[in-house]
Image (spheres, rainbow, N blue to C red):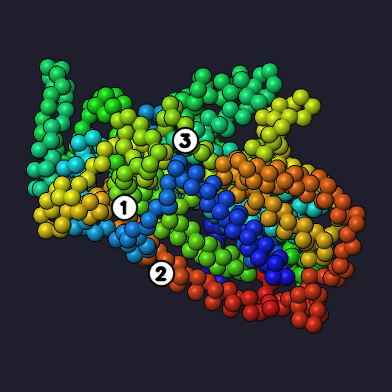
């Protein structure tokens, strides 16, 4: 009996060991599970944190926008970040937009208007690839919705630049990222402590900037989340009352047939 | 005297009814329509499906007013709907999640029919019309999924239309014909849009036929025995109108949960990346409601008698759907309801598990255990319909059926007629 048990344990241990070996071999290619972050917009009552959105926009504008466009955002959309119309107008005017053709048939540059889309860093995808060693920096206005894991994934990528494990081959011109599929990412580590100075005094650590910019990008991907959650709560209240009323009516009407 | 004359409204209705018996028909089919008194909540799903068809058509028409079916503009036009159209996000999420809700309801409705033998004589055509609706729904949903022109849209369109290339000799020409070109592109998107707008109205027409066939003999019921007289039935209104309304509100809570709190849970993140013909996604997966057919398609990895695996897979996949058309003649048991079929009752649940297993297989990359499970589940699916269903009727000894619905469900089993006050004459 005792020997049988011991043998069983031994077999189990051997199986576990072989699994561990197999797993560590596979891990070189696989990415660890995404750590879950606390987001202000999580859950049914979640809303975007305006201060984080403003800090996140600052991180995007000063760092990410060097390579990544936010194709689906217009300057006017920034009103949701509590910027005043004058602030938005001034911000838009600091960018150049192509307009025209004028009455001479020429396209011309003018300061952007709040009704213009926010211009990206490159005129087209080919120019973006040419400037980035052949890799296309993806549009960030949709990225949170376009990746498995959403905000947790984007946050993990921004914090996932760790030294490559021994024996891992990092392709020339690429960087090791723990959470990127295949680990070879074309983007150099974009954030470093103190890279921006927040007006509200928040300390600009890498996790802080990553958290803020991911909040901003989540808003960029799903700008109607606040409204959706608010209307949803009312719809639920309405329906729950409806369920009660119809259930009572059903009971009363059916009482005669049961 | 003036107050004894019918009101103006009544007189107008009578005038119309005399020439066009619309109100009389509505009264007959919705108000006094005799319905078995013992329907359980599984019978709610028919009216729920009808409700969802209307929701899909209404939300779809509003989306169509803002959507642009061109390969270069489709993706951005969907984003414009999400961001700039008033409540566009609500309409789109209601439509996208509505498709999932519609399929969930219809699948429950179909399994209810299988459990209670609703397809048996004299309701074979009712069942067949239902299967036709399912086939049309799948075609409509597939084409609708292509319209946002995201990565999964594009590659789903490529994979599914390429299935037709499995047809010998003319297959490749058919695919080119379907695409309107040599690859999925602008012409494909345009025609899918046109058909996606057309098919729901054809579904609506078949639903009308489905209702006409239903009202010929009335609903089946959990006992599976016919209504034998007044004591077995109650008028549709108010009994089932209120029961359907109650069920509808409960359903709306679930629907609203997805629309407002998990609108992208059932979708695929890849579809928020614009279609890119140069880059294939790692795993091409259909929406959840098509996973079992996809699993069957991929399970045939071998050729038989020189018929290539691809063609066999396509046949097995489409066959799993069209097989349902002949279920009324495959089932040899004269007893409808599983309540009185001791063996079929269990076999039914095995089929449910089998289909869920196929769904799981369809969602996972085809390697290792997934392939084996898929092949066993595919085999069992066909075994169920082609062997077990015909065989069980021969070997199974059903429990004795009750004398009537009233005898079985009323206290004391008196079979008394419902009080006259309940009936609308």
Q: Mark on residue B281? A: 3
Residues under labels 2 and 1: Cα distance? 20 Å
Disc 3 sits on a residue from what chain?
B
Identify which residue is drawn at 16% across, 25% down. A100
Residues under labels 2 and 3: Cα distance? 41 Å
* Labels 2, 3: front one: 3
Residues under labels 1 and 3: Cα distance? 28 Å
Identify which residue is drawn at 70% across, 47% down. B377
- Give x and y (percent) for residue B44: 62, 62
Discs 1, 3: same chain: no
Disc 2 sits on a residue from what chain?
A
Identify the residue position indicated by label 2 in the image: A237
Specify whether residue B323 is in view.
Answer: yes
Task: Say which quadrant the C terminus of chain B sits in.
Answer: bottom right
Identify the residue position indicated by label 1 in the image: A224
Specify whether residue A53 is in view.
Answer: no
Check the image and report above or below for A227 versus B298: below
Q: Secondary structure at mark 1?
A: loop
- Give x and y (percent) for residue A90: 8, 43
Return the residue found at the far front. A3
Q: Secondary structure at mark 3?
A: loop
């Amino acid at each position: 009996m005792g020997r049988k048990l011991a043998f069983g344990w031994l077999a189990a241990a051997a199986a576990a060991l072989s699994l561990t070996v197999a797993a560590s071999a596979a891990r070189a290619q696989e990415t660890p599970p995404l750590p879950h972050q606390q987001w202000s917009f999580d859950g049914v009552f979640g809303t975007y944190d305006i201060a984080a959105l403003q800090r996140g926009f600052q991180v995007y504008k000063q760092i990410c926008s060097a390579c990544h466009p936010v194709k689906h955002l217009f300057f006017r959309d920034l009103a949701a970040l509590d910027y005043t119309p004058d602030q938005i107008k001034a911000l838009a005017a600091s960018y150049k937009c192509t307009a025209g053709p004028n009455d001479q048939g020429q396209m011309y540059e003018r300061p952007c208007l709040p009704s213009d889309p926010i211009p990206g860093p490159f005129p087209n995808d080919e120019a973006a690839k040419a400037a980035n060693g052949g890799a296309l920096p993806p549009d960030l206005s949709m990225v949170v919705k376009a990746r498995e894991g959403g905000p947790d994934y984007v946050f993990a990528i921004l914090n996932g630049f760790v030294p490559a494990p021994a024996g891992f081959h990092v392709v020339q011109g690429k960087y090791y990222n723990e959470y990127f599929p295949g680990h070879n990412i074309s983007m150099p580590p974009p954030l470093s402590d103190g890279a921006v100075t927040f007006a509200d005094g928040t300390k600009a650590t890498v996790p802080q900037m990553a958290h803020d910019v991911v909040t901003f990008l989540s808003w960029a991907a799903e700008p109607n989340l606040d409204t959706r959650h608010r209307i949803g709560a009312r719809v639920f209240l309405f329906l729950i009352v409806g369920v009660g009323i119809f259930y009572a009516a059903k009971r009363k009407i059916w009482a005669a047939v049961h | 005297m003036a107050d004894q004359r019918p009101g103006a409204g009544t007189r107008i209705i009578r005038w119309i009814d005399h020439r066009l018996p619309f109100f009389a028909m509505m009264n007959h089919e919705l108000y006094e329509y005799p319905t078995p008194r013992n329907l359980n909540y599984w019978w709610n799903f028919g009216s729920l499906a009808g409700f969802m068809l209307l929701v899909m058509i209404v939300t779809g028409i509003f989306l169509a007013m803002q959507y642009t079916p061109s390969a270069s503009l489709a993706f951005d036009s969907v984003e414009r709907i999400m961001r700039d159209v008033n409540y566009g996000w609500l309409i789109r999420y209601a439509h996208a999640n509505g498709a999932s809700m519609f399929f969930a309801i219809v699948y429950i409705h179909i399994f209810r029919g299988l459990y209670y033998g609703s397809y048996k004589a004299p309701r074979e055509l009712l069942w067949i019309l239902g299967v036709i609706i399912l086939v049309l729904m799948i075609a409509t949903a597939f084409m609708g999924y292509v319209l946002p022109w995201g990565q999964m849209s594009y590659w789903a369109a490529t994979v599914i239309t390429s299935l037709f290339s499995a047809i010998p000799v003319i297959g490749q020409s058919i695919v080119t014909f379907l695409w309107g070109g040599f690859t999925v592109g602008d012409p494909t998107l345009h025609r899918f849009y046109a058909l996606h707008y057309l098919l729901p109205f054809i579904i609506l027409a078949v639903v009308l036929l489905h209702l006409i066939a239903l009202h010929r003999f009335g609903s089946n019921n959990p006992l599976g025995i016919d209504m034998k007289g007044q004591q077995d039935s109650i008028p549709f209104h108010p009994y089932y109108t209120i029961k359907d309304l109650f069920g509808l509100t409960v359903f709306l809570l679930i629907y609203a949960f997805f629309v407002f709190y998990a609108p992208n849970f059932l979708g695929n993140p890849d579809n928020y990346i614009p279609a890119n013909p140069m880059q294939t996604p790692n795993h091409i997966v259909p929406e959840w409601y098509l996973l079992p057919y996809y699993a069957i398609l991929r399970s045939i990895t071998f050729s038989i008698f020189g018929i290539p695996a691809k063609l066999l897979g396509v046949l097995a996949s489409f066959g799993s759907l069209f097989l349902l058309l002949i279920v009324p003649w495959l089932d040899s048991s004269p007893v409808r309801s599983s309540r009185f079929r001791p063996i079929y009752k269990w076999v039914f649940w095995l089929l449910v598990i089998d289909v869920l297993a196929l769904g799981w297989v369809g969602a996972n990359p085809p390697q290792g255990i997934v392939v084996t499970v898929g092949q066993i589940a595919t085999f069992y699916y066909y075994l169920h319909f082609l062997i077990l269903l015909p065989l069980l009727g021969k070997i199974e000894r059903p429990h004795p059926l009750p004398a009537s619905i009233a005898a079985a469900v009323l206290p004391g089993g008196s079979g008394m007629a419902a009080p006259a006050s309940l009936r609308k004459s």
